[in-house]
Amino acid sequence: MLKHTPFYDFHVSAGAKLVDFAGWEMPLYYRGIVEEHEQTRRSGSIFDVSHMGRLHFSGKDAATFLNHVLTRNIAEQKLGQSRYSLVCNESGGVMDDVIVSRDVKNWVLVCNASNRAKLVKYFNEVRQSRGLDLDFSDQTESTAMAAIQGPKVIERMADVLPVDVRSLKRYGFESSSFLMTKFTIFRSGYTGEDGVEVVIPAKVAGMAMKMLAGKTDRPEATIKPAGLGARDTLRLEAAMPLYGHELNEETDPLSAGLQWAVDLKKEFVGAAALRKVAESGPRRKLVGLELEGRRIARQGVAIKSGDGVVGVVTSGTFGPTVQKSIALAYVDAGLSGEGTHLAADLNGVATPARVVKLPFFKR
Amino acid sequence: METPANYRYLPSHEWHFAEGDTVTIGITHFAAEELTDVTFVGLPKVGTKVQADQRFGEIESVKATSDLYSGISGSVIEVNSELATNPGLVNSDPYKKGWMIKVKVSTPAELQRLLSVEDYLKKAGH
């Protein structure tokens, strides 16, 4: 039985094509993946991201706990700040990539839907084994979360929200109350565009959708709904990693180019293993590839240099904005330099692929 | 979108339209919607022999890659070169401008094996 987010009725009435995503029935698209991608780059889109996990931590040892399981040093994180971080296992493999935010009374960790159950179990084990004084609650299903993204979103939200979103810094957030309803607004996203992510109680989701997006069915609407299909092509153009593709438990964050989110000066689960990787340098690195032609190199496609296999694709698409066949791939570190000429093996056909600077798209 | 009554179909969603001994092949709007936005259509060269129930090309979208099958045997006499630069025609006009290949049929009786529109819609679950 698939789970439904609080926006499910909206998806059905808007005619979404629904698919199973990590146990949730989610919109793949409403009108078309490319159209929704372009709408996001041109104006604005609203995405239901309620399936993502929202875990709350409070109590005396909350910060100690988080600093133990996260790669980022949160001791220096200010109130009202959000940060991208990783949760690693002892071997330095990535258990999940998350956004952690410091609120007045608690910390909020947003994790991937596919990793939520695993993290909840793991966090409970760590709490018990270390005997920490910590309140830990999973608020995923009592709340809804929407991402509103695009160049016209901040102006539009400034008119709608009772919070000064224009003055919110990137990766800043603010919690407030409106008509007796608590909500939190983050200036963050996963599209390469400016925008906000909003968390509200599940029961006001229907009303909030109308308030945030307005009449989304008009052709000239500033903000229209967009599904997971466009979310994927947008994040890929922006070269943001997706768990299960660029990241997994056998992949370390340094090879993935995420050293900026790993503080090796502090102790955390996986730190020892990651220091070894940092010392010797990653054997393979995540790179961006631009392919010749319109063919797409999807996850699992082999990357070759001459006759030898030197890497593997983790994500690929035809970028609707960049109008090129693009891919992220792990390749031997010696072949990861910009401009290196490689080839993607597409059903036995070697298609020229060149290592390019990331991201593929930058506003 | 209407599924044309005078076309013949494969369960794998290819349509066939016969005029004399020439058959035009494309994919139905159900297939196009399932694939989502088409980004590439790989078609054979003119002169290539195609065989009934064999793969003649492939189609890619932002979401998936899938093979294209012919319901009839013969040789390719024309390919839709428009699709090389505008593969989105498969989504916007699957039964007309989104056609893929024209085949000169070698075994006309094979056409009778293909599904009528009613049978196709039943098989496709619509």
Image: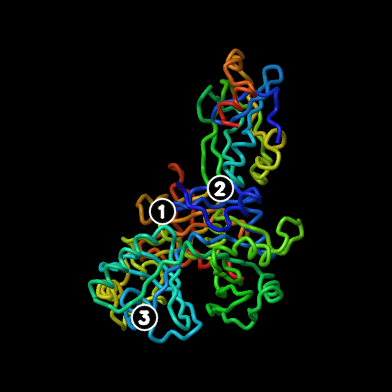
Q: Amino acid at mark 2?
A: Leu
Alpha-carbon span between mark 1 and mark 3:
49 Å
Alpha-carbon span between mark 2 and mark 1:
33 Å
Q: Which residue is mark 2?
A: A18
Q: Nearer the viewer, residue A27 or A234?
A: A27
N-terminal of the pair, mark 2 or mark 1, is 2
N-terminal of the pair, mark 1 or mark 3, is 3
Q: Select label 1 or label 3 by which is in front.
A: 3
Residue at point 42%, 69% (across, down): A55
Q: Select label 3 or label 2 by which is in front.
A: 3
Check the residue under mark 2 and report the chain it is in. Answer: A
Check the residue under mark 1 and report the chain it is in. Answer: A
How many labels were placed on the picture?
Answer: 3
Check the residue under mark 3 and report the chain it is in. Answer: A
Regarding mark 3 in the picture, which secondary structure is present there?
A: loop
- Quadrant in the picture for residue B20: top right
In this rendering, position of residue A214 left or right of residue B65: right
Q: Which residue is mark 3?
A: A59
Q: Position of residue B84 (x, y in %)?
A: 64, 43
Alpha-carbon span between mark 3 and mark 2:
39 Å
Q: Is residue A7 above or below residue A147?
A: above
Q: Which residue is mark 1?
A: A303
Q: Amino acid at mark 1?
A: Ile
Q: Amino acid at mark 3?
A: Gly
